[in-house]
Image (spheres, coloured by chain):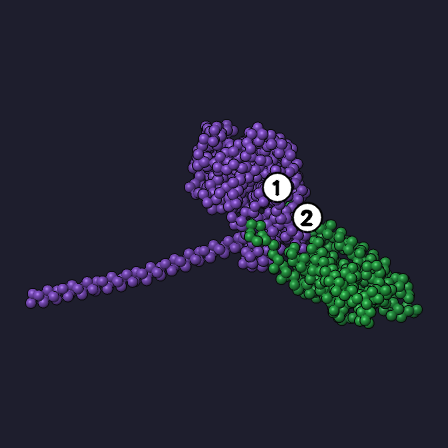
Chain colours: A green, B purple
Amino acid sequence: MKFSTALSPHVQPVNSVTRVMFEVIIALVPGVIALVWFFGLGVLINVVLAVITALMAESLVLLVRGRPVWVSLKDLSAVVTAVLLAISLPAIAPWWVTVTGIVFAIVIAKHLYGGLGYNPFNPAMIGYVFLLVSFPLPMTSWPAMTGLGTVTLNFQDIAQVILFERIPENADYDALTMATPLDALKTQLSLQKSVLEAQSGAVFGYLAGKGWEWVSLAYLLGGLWLIVRKIINWHIPVGLILGISVISGICYLIDAQIYAPPMFHLFAGATMLGAFFIATDPVTAATTVKGRLIYGMMIGVLVYIIRVWGGYPDAVAFSVLLANLAAPALDYFTKPRVFGHRA
Amino acid sequence: MLNLARFHGGLHLPNNKELSNQAPLLQASIPKKLVYPLMQRPGVNVDPKVQVGDRVLRGQVIAHSDHPLATPVHAASSGVIETIEERLIPHPSGMADVCIVIATDGLDESLVTQGVADFSSQDPAAIRTAIKNAGIVGLGGAAFPTSIKLNPGPQRKLDTLLLNGAECEPYITCDDCLMQNQPESVLVGAQILLHSLHIERCIVAIEDHMKRAYARLTQAVAALNDPRIIIVQVPAIYPTGGEKQLIKVVTGKETPSGGIPADIGVLCVNVGTASAVYDAVCKGKPLTERVITVTGRGVKEPQNRYVRIGTPISELIEQCGGYTEHVERLIMGGPMMGFALPDDEIAVVKATNCILAGTAADINTGKQAMPCIRCGDCAKACPVDLLPQQLYWHSRAGNLDKCKEFSLFDCIECGCCEVVCPSHIPLVQYYRSAKSKVIAKAKEAEKAAVAKRRHDMHLERKTKEQAEKAERARLKKEALAKVKQANAEKEGVTQ
């Protein structure tokens, strides 16, 4: 009897890209729920808009590149990029902000570099930074947290804001938005207030910002789930958290008047999202064990430096992109000792 | 008790061993044909010592050669040499080579041979000769001649004999089965090896799920009352049964890259090989049969059997109830490192430990490769601590120097990286291809170096010849001049 042959190993593969991406999406659910809870349904509108745009952009580029469309679409990498970017955007950002950002992320940051696996920079973060420098106003206009603002918007109002930039009659744009805790802290410090004085403001909560701290905790939960499911390794998140804790801890010990405590930096802004979901993008991160630890620490330290001494209130996107640049070198200098070789 | 170490990475694989290790160990019946390839290893061929039409007996040498790595081939049953012709041989490339084919007569007549009951009176060199004459090679899969392994040279000081019973590949249970049924022959084989190596320590390593084999071996050691032999259970992590991995687990020592275990004082042989050594030395029986696992969901009655070496796989499968309807692939060896056979007329050889008839439930029937997402799961799984992903990029780009820099040749092709790869990239294939390219390039470079040396020597010889010629001419001239002078003087004298 004749048989067809194949090369070893003959064992079924135990994992797939689709599964990896799907689990990442699942792990983002708590964070998305928390965002919706505190910042309204605009978050969901952004996510849906982003996913649809991403799938369309991805299909189009694949067609142009003459690549099989379905095979790549079903790897869900475009969906992950879309969700990550969408939840980084203010929950009332106009639709064209989301669409432009996604198109830039998928077409320029991902496919012009060769598509999945070949992009040197995190596409979602490229999209974010591109939007931030191009459209700073809508990108920094976060809606007031539910209960904190002067007006309450229903779903229809939010959809009007996002899709038609039409503001409800009983409010103006300023009434809709509110400074984020990181923003507020920066402003207060520049007014020669102390950290403690600044933190008495309405937007601050127990750990960091009101609402924001819960969103961060939800991301932390999802991230831990990813580690348990072996989708990500602990090295990058731990490195990042360690990096930001150590540098903020040192500064806090030096002068608690002008430097916020480590807990604030851990649970404010996108620290947790960055640590578990963005810095861990395998394509653009370092891949060796030591390399990943250093990579995480680098991002943590950079986030702090840019937040405290830089021009932007948050810095996860910039820090990740800067560390992306360093990833190949980190891999090169942190090769493990091969079995049977001398140290 | 030994403190066990562990190696980096490895995998917990569904082992599927219960498929084949429940049935009793039976003797396979004598096949109608026995087939023996003349190629033993790449570059090691043996010459037929029989002619078509000759009648041969079981245990009779039918092929041999003077090559140091060659071992004699013995007929596994009596019969007549039917033909000597090209046939498919068990080789990953599916190549054909010259084979001796015996039509068996069913009488199974053997050459009368005698072993030595008391091996301790034997000289180690005599034991090695007996092992070589019995055609014994490593039965774990590599088929390296055992007699050569037993003689690592005076510069290497051995202290431990490691019997490898850690059958780490999924599905395979032939060593497990052998240890359950013949623990004495394995252990006496170990005693013979200890004697011939002048060492006092033997560790038999088996995987921790082999409960029955452990009990049987422990009993047998107690019966032999030999304190030199200890039985150790090691965690079942693939590829624990890899020689260098097992040595690391048991002794904590790493075989240096490019070296052999004897460099760190360890000699590692498969338990089946030890049993074959016992048969050869104490019973005078050459290696003509071995235990083989026939398994997978593609065969009706998976089991282990004593199989005559040279038995065509088709006959073996028939004795195990035939194929099931869904059989997809025929693999010689395990699912991780075994190779797929194009045809079941191919016969089993000494290194054959398993025939796996796989269905879609057993094997990967083809998944589309996606781009590498650099997740690093491969590096986490690699038992050698390589960076498989970097090796993949460099071998794909044909960057052979970089491949060497990332220790391509330390790769043992265990397949762990490929099994965990979420992108289903055929990584091992890339490494094999890169290795063969490096070897081909080295050969070419060597050829070029030889040619250059030859050319240089030619030039040197030429210049030397010319110098010699000039010297001779000068000497001749001088001699002539002398003669002339002498003549002139003579003339002068006579004048």
Instruction: Name which residue type carries label 1.
Output: Asn
Q: Circle 1 sits on which residue?
A: B3
Q: Residue at x 86, y 67 (%)?
A: A177
| Residue count near mark 1 (Cα–Cα under 10 Å), binned few <14, some 14–19, many ≥20 | few
Q: Residue at x 93, y 69 (%)?
A: A170
Whether residue B245 sits left or right of residue B67 in the image: it is: right
Q: Circle 2 sits on which residue?
A: A14
- Residue B442 vertical position relative to residue B306 in the rendered view, above or below: below
Q: Does label 2 lie on the same chain as label 1?
A: no
- Residue B165 vertical position relative to residue B455 in the rendered view, above or below: above
Residue at the front extreme of this rendering: A254
Residue A70 seen = no
Q: Position of residue B377 (x, y in %)?
A: 66, 52
| Residue count near mark 2 (Cα–Cα under 10 Å), binned few <14, some 14–19, many ≥20 | few
Q: Residue at x 60, y 39 (%)?
A: B2
Q: Position of residue A215 (x, y in %)?
A: 81, 58
Q: Position of residue A51 (x, y in %)?
A: 78, 60
Whether residue B340 sits left or right of residue A189 in the image: it is: left
Q: Secondary structure at mark 1?
A: loop
Instruction: Name which residue type carries label 2.
Output: Val
User: What chain letter is assigned to the residue under label 2?
Assistant: A
Residue A237 seen = yes
Quarter in which the C terminus of chain B is drawn: bottom left
Which of A16/B208 is in front? B208
Which of B262/B258 is in front? B262
